[in-house]
Image (spheres, grey):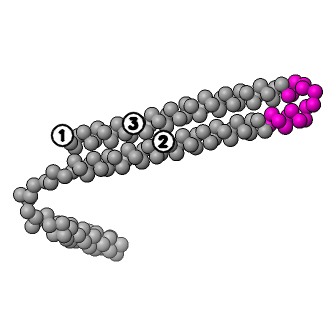
Amino acid sequence: MQLNYFMKRLSTVGLWVAKTLLCMAALTFVWQGAFFSNTTALADSTPQLIATGAADQIKGAADKVTEGSKNIIRGTENKVKETANTNAAKVDQADEDGGIAERKAMRDKNRIESRAERDADRTEKTAEKSMNAVKNAVDNIKDAFSK
């Protein structure tokens, strides 16, 4: 069975790809010194210091993220309350005699404000919980390196 033109080209390309990968693997081993490295070297005892420094940096970053999240959450809560107050004031101006629309607007404003506070508190607790999980994971990793 004779290969057609396309199959000959494909087999030639496959042969070249295999040769290239073999050469690249050989170069990688030589480059990294896998064949000529000194395997009797001992590990330095400073990784604990590196892990400690990195752990402190990660904890500091987690604290910054927590504070930033709290600021965003509280800012959003204030914006929602401000919008509810603005809408209630508009309804109050439109309805001079204190009718049903004004009372409903005030109830809605109070409901929106209380819900905004609850949602902000819940979101803030969740953000703190996730950052505490990050800190605990960092502590566990730090403890694993120190043993």
User: In the rendered image, which quarter is residue 95 located in?
Assistant: top right
| Helix, strand or loop for disc 3 | helix
User: Residue sitting at 56 percent across and 43 percent down?
Assistant: 71
| Helix, strand or loop for disc 2 | helix
| Disc 3 to disc 2, C-alpha distance | 12 Å
Q: Residue furthest right?
A: 97
Q: Nearer the viewer, residue 44 or 36?
A: 44
Expressed as whole percent of the image width and height from the top left, the position of residue 133 reads 39, 36
Q: Which residue type does callout 1 highlight?
A: Lys
Expressed as whole percent of the image width and height from the top left, the position of residue 90 reads 84, 37
User: In the rendered image, which quarter is residue 147 located in?
Assistant: top left
Give the vertical position of 133 relative to 39 (above or below): above
Tell me if residue 98 is in the magenta stretch. yes
Give the labeled residue for mark 3.
133
What secondary structure do most residues of the magenta stretch adopt? helix
- Residues shaded magenta: 87-102
Answer with left or right where residue 19 lies relative to residue 59. left
Give the labeled residue for mark 2.
66
| Disc 2 to disc 1, C-alpha distance | 30 Å
Give the labeled residue for mark 1.
147
Whichever of labels 3 and 1 marks the residue nearer the N terminus, that label is: 3
Q: Which residue type does callout 2 highlight?
A: Thr
Whichever of labels 3 and 2 marks the residue nearer the N terminus, that label is: 2
User: Residue sitting at 42 percent across and 48 percent down?
Assistant: 61
Q: Is residue 137 visible?
A: yes
Tell me if residue 34 is in the magenta stretch. no
